């Protein structure tokens, strides 16, 4: 980058020519006061507080906006600019109610600070008061125009970072206020970024703070929702969490949070948290002591182990529990119970994206989001970045703004993006492989023998295969025009640093593995990096920890006798050869009567796994069920013993996010009631059953993890700082073409079940916890089936009608949402709603779920 | 002109107390005395000072009213403009109400000084200026107001409006600073929406506009004007590349009245667009097979690609305009016949597509190798390009058509292209940017030469005999008139001569219509404000009214004409609004001062427009300019100083 020389306050400095005077000054330790400036936004220039004098210019200029120039001489402290800055702050204070005593922002208010800094103690300026309307009808966001300084940060963050562009300045002059663009009550992502960036108390949370800022201590931890893993702060006072905040310039999120991350914390002290262990007495679960409960569990487990062997005891770990919890969970099963029959929901759904991730695919899929930051073309496949992982959406948006990255969105639903993507393909569900092959075909067609990818293993066979593909055929079967396929192929082909993001639709897809293989072929040609979304905060970690039936921690196969020997040495004792249970699916095994006891840690499997009815049936067949959870979930209602689990805010540990980044969660408050961290319960249980688990702190467990799993080697709690530590999976990147053929998904009689059912996450709910958070339920209280307007019209269904959705596995009653987001013939139902459990409709055995819809 | 007082542009003319007969002259001031038929202007207050024509103005009242207006117009985007002027307003109202104190005057002055220094846009920067002038030159009036403790007289009628130098210079009246600001804020689609309020032709204008705005840009006083024109193109391109939903016309065909528009050039397309937006059923008749009029057939594809123009026309069709190509008017279809079919109003914008004669011997002889520029360019688009490969070309003329005529053969493989122009480079009427590009592409120039005779052998052109010229006295256009040098004939050898010295209008459209007057240049006469002709249902605009002029003038005429047609059809008086009258006053007074010293640090240079390599220009019609990227556009837009400013007139009923 070009450098220029300039002088600021007599100090000679060298700066990048693209920097502003403010940035150059800051880099050189020269302080210029600001108010509207925010590093992550384009300069706004409304507050005029950062004015400086520049030699050769009559008027002072805002340092946040002017670029550095060769030979420039800047004064940040001339009498004139100091006077003008003071005037600016005085002007803000005209009719600004000095209600600091009752203002939520007091103590962290930029206006307070700057008034104090400038020593302003007298106000001689007045303007005629203007009546303004406080907006307390915006649900989770409250706007008080009397406190507003119109710095426009909220407008800009909403537009640039969030892409919602919900706000504008209404009226002119002194009557100006912030309002929504359509002047109706706010209807947005409710990410609360506007609150986070407001320098004063104008924008505040609908979850009213009720604490003074200086009383709150911030505990740095990680958000417990999705696999992005945003660092957050829990603001705590006297054992209670008052709010979630975040810091710019830290972590993957750069201070950005989504609605769930910012407002979805109320599950922590929800009324219905389980506060004591519960034991089944007849058809009731009654409170019991920990000793009583654990004794019962250990007795029962021992009894079953003795009579049926350890293999008869199965366990399901949690994608939300920490690495330490999950590690100990599998160690307890393997060393104490002598069972490999453990699994996790992700792996149960499709093991290729769980335990098989590093052997099924030739290229690494767990990659840093740094690749997005640097990319020039971002290709999302089966992903709804705005809704599913809003912060990943923020990251993509920043690449679009700063790097002019072009965005290509491909999905079987019209998911779109904000701002609108450069290209959008809505393909027919099930035709993904053909579409990807078509794109590759369009790329390599006519490139000759010296073209891209010729040197890669398997190229001849692959390119020969492509010869048989006709773009017209691809187009008619995928629903994407030939012209668009060609345009996108050319865009990807010209890209220097492409990134391909696979969303939930892909890893839950019956052909998910082949789709990723097809994308790897594409990636081989364009030299791209593939990234895989992870749904929950520790979906990656739980698989690393070996909560899978066929692999030890670190993906060492249980069938491998050498590995067995190694782990026996590490852990002491004898490990089971292999469980008697033959199928890998615990639920099917239970149906077949092979599972005598089940230990479920932190998952509501009835609402989570495919075919909820089937899961219920399985649970009914199991003799003894232990559920460790924060809430009395439907699964817990089947339990014989329920153990109260502490929330993420009440314990220590680590999570591994979708990038393979290990981040530390920290204890902010004491466990609620008698709840305990999962690992503590497991440890005690293990020790009661003859295990020797001597861990005092989670750090002890983590140290063991780092010795057991080489990829985690070298990571220590103290070295995990703000940005975490990335696991070194040491995956060999083997470029190789595989011929991936489109094979149509067999379909059942279409006349009876005309719709393809898709499911996924939506804005305000993920997993079980958001449903326990009042704020999230206020935003989306109920589940709705999304249906295309033309389909709705054919069925004579209107928006918000109540309908029955029936598949061959089950049926649910649900309200409709008529939207173009669902293409013709496709309906979408969000997961996570226990009162409309879409998983009762799905069935793992069926490649695709077809449903019919009718009004009762 | 004669004024009682003026502090305009800091030049003080003070005739107070003097006998009107002996008033000193204000030679550069151009404030019109008449506002409209009913009202005279007695004073003006605005961004650059105060002008009083009569002594019946209470200056305290005028300042108060002015700052009140500023408060209403200030955008709320900076603290000083938004709150600072509110504080000034309170002080001024206090003084005007007879409740002021002397210390208020000092505070007002200090505040005005500082707001002027610190504000983000020119509303905040310039609005305090007339108040400061008033406090300085009319101090006694303020002191009297404070001491008398009486409300000052407030019977004068004031009208005011915002303006900006670029805005005032744009014939379409486009809100330029706002559309630039939207680009800066990464809101290109909102920018485009604002652009379309003034013209639907963002693609053509953003590529080929003569951009008078840039010649009136205050940033030029610092270092270089903002690239206003090309930012417009950026917004349009962005929509094509990114947007999934184009705007829809919610008023489509809500009215029964049908309007016929003739000519699908910038004027016709624009008029049709605005009429369609108002709900009329518009049919656009075009004699050519392609849209764009002179933009389509006169501007080559390397400047405005055909598909760009087609997309622009498609957008207008989607708004509810029926475009009938290959449909000339004046023979089978005439205006009277269309009247019978139920068309209620007509807009004539058929342009100037006939080549003027250059007055050289042999131009009517039908020589092979002699071609008229307009025909040459048109044929290149709709039939076939003249074969020029390996040939020597002479283009006669120095305007933008000549530029297009010389840069086209370069692309078709001509051996040598030479421009013959009768004045010097300095007088070339073509856009300097075009001249520069032509030179880059290898076009040669022969200045101070006029065509006298076409030399030919066997009916084929062999060259052009020219006369040397020298510059004499300035003519009516202000340019020095070229004068022949006797006996200076010389021959420039050539295979092809393209004559591009100007165009005339084809008026056959008026067949069967009585009552329309024509000028001596054979253009249609209409009211220059409303574009209504003497036949009340016929309106006009574009080159057929202006004579060969610019795209943006045509588009501007059409925007206003559509409003007039709406007024006419809805039964209201066809006339200008107060705002439009104010725009006229401001235009006359001048919203841009070339001499102004803008107190900004120079050196933030314009972002250069990316262009294609030379080797892709020769032999190809690929668009030369590739357009700004997003980051380039944001950076360029960030240079804009948002030079909004407010002007206010005092009015007095004519007796």
Image: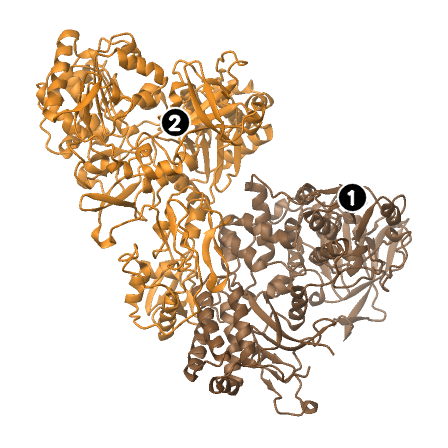
Chain colours: A orange, B brown
Q: CA distance from mark 1 to mark 2?
A: 68 Å
Q: Mark 1–mark 2 contact, CB under 8 Å?
A: no
Of the pair B458 and B34, the residue shown nearer to us: B34
Q: Secondary structure at mark 1?
A: loop
Occupied quadrant, residue A544: top left
Q: Which mark is residue B132?
A: none
Residue A247, position as x, y percentages in the image? 30, 48
Residue A58 seen anywhere in this rendered image of the structure: no
Occupied quadrant, residue A638: top left
Of the pair B360 and B461, the residue shown nearer to us: B360
Above or below A666: residue A292: above
Of the pair A689 and A818, the residue shown nearer to us: A818
Residue A847 seen anywhere in this rendered image of the structure: yes
Q: Please report, as a chain letter, where disc 1 is located.
A: B
Occupied quadrant, residue A695: top left
Q: Secondary structure at mark 2?
A: loop
Above or below B359: residue B591: below
Please tell me which residue is depicted at 15% across the width and 11% down the height of the picture: A305
Mark 2: few/some/many CA within 10 Å (<14, 14-19, 20+): many
Residue A629, position as x, y percentages in the image? 23, 27
A692 to the left or right of B373: left
Mark 1: few/some/many CA within 10 Å (<14, 14-19, 20+): few
Above or below A665: residue A120: below
Residue B173, position as x, y percentages in the image? 64, 60
Instruction: State whether discs 1 and 2 lie on one chain.
Output: no
Q: Which mark is residue B387?
A: 1
Q: Please report, as a chain letter, where disc 2 is located.
A: A
User: Label 2 belongs to which residue?
Assistant: A831
Residue B60, position as x, y percentages in the image? 53, 80
């Amino acid at each position: 980058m070009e450098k220029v020389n300039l002088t600021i306050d007599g100090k000679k400095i060298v700066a990048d020519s693209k920097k502003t005077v403010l940035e150059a000054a800051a880099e050189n330790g020269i302080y210029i006061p600001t108010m509207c400036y925010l590093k992550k936004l384009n300069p706004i220039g409304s507050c005029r507080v950062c004015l400086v004098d520049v030699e050769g210019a009559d008027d002072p200029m805002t340092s946040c906006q002017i670029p550095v120039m060769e030979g420039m001489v800047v004064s940040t402290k001339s009498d004139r600019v100091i006077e003008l800055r003071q005037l600016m702050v005085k002007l803000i204070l005209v009719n600004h109610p000095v209600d600091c005593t009752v203002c939520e922002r007091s103590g962290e208010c930029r206006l307070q600070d700057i008034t104090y800094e400038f020593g302003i103690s007298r106000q001689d300026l007045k303007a005629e008061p203007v009546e303004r309307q406080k907006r307390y009808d915006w649900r989770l966001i409250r706007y008080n125009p009397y406190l507003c300084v119109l710095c426009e940060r909220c407008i800009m963050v909403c537009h640039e970072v969030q892409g919602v562009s919900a706000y504008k300045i209404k009226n002119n002059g002194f009557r100006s206020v912030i309002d929504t663009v359509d002047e109706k009550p706010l209807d947005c992502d409710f990410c609360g970024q506007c609150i986070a960036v407001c320098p004063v108390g104008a924008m505040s949370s609908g979850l009213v703070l009720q604490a003074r800022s200086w009383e709150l201590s911030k505990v740095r931890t990680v958000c417990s929702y999705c696999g992005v893993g945003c660092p957050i702060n829990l603001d705590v006072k006297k054992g209670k969490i008052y709010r979630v905040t975040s810091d710019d310039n830290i972590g993957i999120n750069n201070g950005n949070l989504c609605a769930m991350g910012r407002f979805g914390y109320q599950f922590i002290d929800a009324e219905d948290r389980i506060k004591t262990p519960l034991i089944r007495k007849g058809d009731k679960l009654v409170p019991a002591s920990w000793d009583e409960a654990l004794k019962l569990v250990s007795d029962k487990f021992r009894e079953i182990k003795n009579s049926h062997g350890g293999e008869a005891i199965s366990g399901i770990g949690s994608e939300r529990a920490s690495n330490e919890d999950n590690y100990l969970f599998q160690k307890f099963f393997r060393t104490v119970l002598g069972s490999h029959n453990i699994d996790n929901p992700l792996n149960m759904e499709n093991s290729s994206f769980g335990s098989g991730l590093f052997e099924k695919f030739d290229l690494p899929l767990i990659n840093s989001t740094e690749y997005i930051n640097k990319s020039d073309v971002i290709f999302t496949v089966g992903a709804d970045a705005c809704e599913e992982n809003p912060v990943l959406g923020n990251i993509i948006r920043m690449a679009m703004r700063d790097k002019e990255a072009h965005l290509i969105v491909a999905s079987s639903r019209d998911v779109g993006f904000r701002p609108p993507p450069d290209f959008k393909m809505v393909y027919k569900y099930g035709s993904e492989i053909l579409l990807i092959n078509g794109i590759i075909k369009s790329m390599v067609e006519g490139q000759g023998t010296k073209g891209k990818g010729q040197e890669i293993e398997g190229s001849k066979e692959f390119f020969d295969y492509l010869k048989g593909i006709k773009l017209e055929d691809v187009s008619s079967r995928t629903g994407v025009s030939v012209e668009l396929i060609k345009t996108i192929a050319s865009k990807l082909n010209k890209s220097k640093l492409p990134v391909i993001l696979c969303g939930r639709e892909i890893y839950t897809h019956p052909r998910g593995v082949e789709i990723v293989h097809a994308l790897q072929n594409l990636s081989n040609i364009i030299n791209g990096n593939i990234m895989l979304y992870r749904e929950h905060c520790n979906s990656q970690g739980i698989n690393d920890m070996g909560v899978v039936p066929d692999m030890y921690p670190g993906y060492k196969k249980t069938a491998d006798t050498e590995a067995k020997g190694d782990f026996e040495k590490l852990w002491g004792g004898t490990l089971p050869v292999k469980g008697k249970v033959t199928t890998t699916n615990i639920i099917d095994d239970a149906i077949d009567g092979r599972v005598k006891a089940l230990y479920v840690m932190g998952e509501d499997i009835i609402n989570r796994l495919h075919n909820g009815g089937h899961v219920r049936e399985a649970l009914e067949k199991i003799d003894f069920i232990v559920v460790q959870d924060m809430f009395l979930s439907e699964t817990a209602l089947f339990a014989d013993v329920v153990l109260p689990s502490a929330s993420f805010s009440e314990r220590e540990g680590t999570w591994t996010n979708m990038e393979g980044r290990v981040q530390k969660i920290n204890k902010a408050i004491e466990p609620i009631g008698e709840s305990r961290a999962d690992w503590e319960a497991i440890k005690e249980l293990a020790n009661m059953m003859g295990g020797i688990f001597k861990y005092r702190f989670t750090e002890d467990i983590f140290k063991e993890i780092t010795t057991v799993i080489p990829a985690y080697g070298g990571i220590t709690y103290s070295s995990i700082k703000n940005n975490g530590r990335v696991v070194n999976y040491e995956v060999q990147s083997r470029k190789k073409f595989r011929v991936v053929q489109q094979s149509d998904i067999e379909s059942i009689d279409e006349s009876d079940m005309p719709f393809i059912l898709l499911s996924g996450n939506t804005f305000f709910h993920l997993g079980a916890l958001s449903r326990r958070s009042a704020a999230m339920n206020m935003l989306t209280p109920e589940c709705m089936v999304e249906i295309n307007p033309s389909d709705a019209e054919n069925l004579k269904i209107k928006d918000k009608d109540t309908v029955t959705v029936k598949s061959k596995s089950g049926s649910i009653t649900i309200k409709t949402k008529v939207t173009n987001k669902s293409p013709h013939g496709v309906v979408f139902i969000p997961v996570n709603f226990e009162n409309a459990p879409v998983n009762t409709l799905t069935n793992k055995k069926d490649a695709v779920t077809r449903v019919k819809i009718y009004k009762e | 002109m004669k004024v009682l007082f003026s502090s305009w542009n800091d030049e003080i003319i003070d005739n107070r107390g003097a006998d009107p007969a002996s008033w000193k002259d204000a030679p550069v001031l151009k404030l019109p005395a008449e506002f409209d038929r009913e009202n005279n202007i007695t004073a003006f207050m605005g961004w650059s000072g105060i002008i009083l024509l009569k002594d019946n103005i209470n200056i305290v009242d005028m300042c108060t009213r002015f700052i009140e207006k500023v408060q209403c117009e200030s955008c709320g985007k900076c603290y000083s403009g938004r709150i600072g002027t509110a504080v000034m307003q309170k002080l001024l109202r206090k003084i005007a109400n007879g409740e002021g104190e002397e210390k208020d005057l000092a505070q007002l002055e200090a505040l005005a000084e500082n707001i002027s220094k610190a504000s983000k846009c020119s509303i905040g920067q310039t609005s305090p200026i007339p108040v400061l002038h008033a406090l300085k030159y009319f101090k006694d009036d303020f002191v009297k107001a404070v001491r008398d403790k009486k409300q000052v007289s407030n019977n004068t009628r004031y009208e005011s409006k915002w303006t900006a130098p670029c805005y005032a210079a744009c014939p379409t009246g486009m809100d330029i600073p706002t559309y630039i600001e939207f680009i800066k804020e990464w809101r290109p689609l909102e920018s485009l929406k604002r652009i379309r309020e003034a013209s639907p032709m963002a693609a053509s204008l953003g590529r080929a506009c003569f951009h008078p705005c840039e010649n009136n840009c205050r940033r030029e006083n610092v270092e270089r004007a903002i690239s206003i024109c090309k930012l417009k193109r950026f917004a349009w391109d962005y929509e094509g590349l990114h947007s999934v939903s184009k705007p829809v016309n919610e008023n489509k065909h809500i009215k029964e009245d049908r309007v016929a528009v003739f000519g699908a050039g910038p004027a016709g397309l624009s008029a049709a667009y605005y009429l369609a937006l108002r709900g009329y059923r518009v049919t656009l008749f075009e004699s050519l097979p392609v849209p764009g009029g002179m933009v389509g057939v006169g501007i080559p594809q390397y400047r405005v690609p055909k598909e760009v123009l087609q997309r622009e026309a498609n957008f207008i069709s989607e708004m509810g305009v029926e475009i009938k190509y290959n449909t000339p008017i004046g023979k089978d279809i005439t205006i009277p016949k269309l009247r019978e079919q139920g068309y209620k109003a007509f807009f004539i914008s058929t342009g100037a597509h006939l080549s003027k004669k250059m007055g050289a011997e042999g131009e009517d002889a039908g020589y092979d190798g002699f071609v008229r520029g307009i025909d040459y360019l048109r044929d290149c688009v709709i039939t076939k390009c003249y074969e020029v490969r390996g040939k020597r070309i002479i283009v006669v003329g120095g305007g933008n058509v000549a530029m297009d005529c010389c840069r086209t053969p370069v692309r078709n493989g001509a051996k040598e292209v030479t421009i013959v122009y009768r004045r010097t480079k300095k007088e070339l009427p073509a856009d300097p940017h075009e001249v520069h590009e032509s030179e880059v592409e290898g076009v040669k120039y022969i200045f101070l030469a006029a065509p006298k005779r076409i030399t030919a052998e066997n009916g084929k052109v062999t060259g052009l005999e020219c006369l040397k010229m020298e510059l004499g006295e300035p003519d009516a256009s202000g340019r020095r008139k070229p004068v022949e040098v006797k006996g200076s004939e010389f021959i420039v050898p050539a295979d092809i001569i393209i004559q591009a010295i100007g165009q005339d209008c084809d008026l056959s459209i008026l067949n069967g219509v009585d009552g329309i007057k024509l000028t001596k240049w054979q253009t249609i006469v209409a009211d220059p404000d409303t574009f209504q002709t003497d036949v009340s249902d016929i309106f006009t605009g574009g080159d057929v009214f202006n004579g060969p002029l610019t795209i943006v003038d045509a588009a501007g005429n059409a925007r206003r004409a559509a409003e007039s047609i709406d007024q006419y059809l809805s039964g209201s008086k066809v006339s200008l609004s107060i705002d439009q009258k104010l725009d006229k006053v401001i235009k006359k007074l001048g919203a841009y001062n070339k001499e102004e010293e803008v107190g900004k640090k120079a050196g933030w240079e314009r972002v250069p427009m990316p262009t294609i390599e030379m080797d892709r220009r020769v032999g190809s019609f690929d668009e030369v300019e590739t357009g700004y990227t997003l980051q380039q556009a944001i950076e360029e837009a960030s240079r804009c100083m948002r030079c909004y400013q407010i002007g206010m007139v005092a009015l007095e009923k004519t007796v």
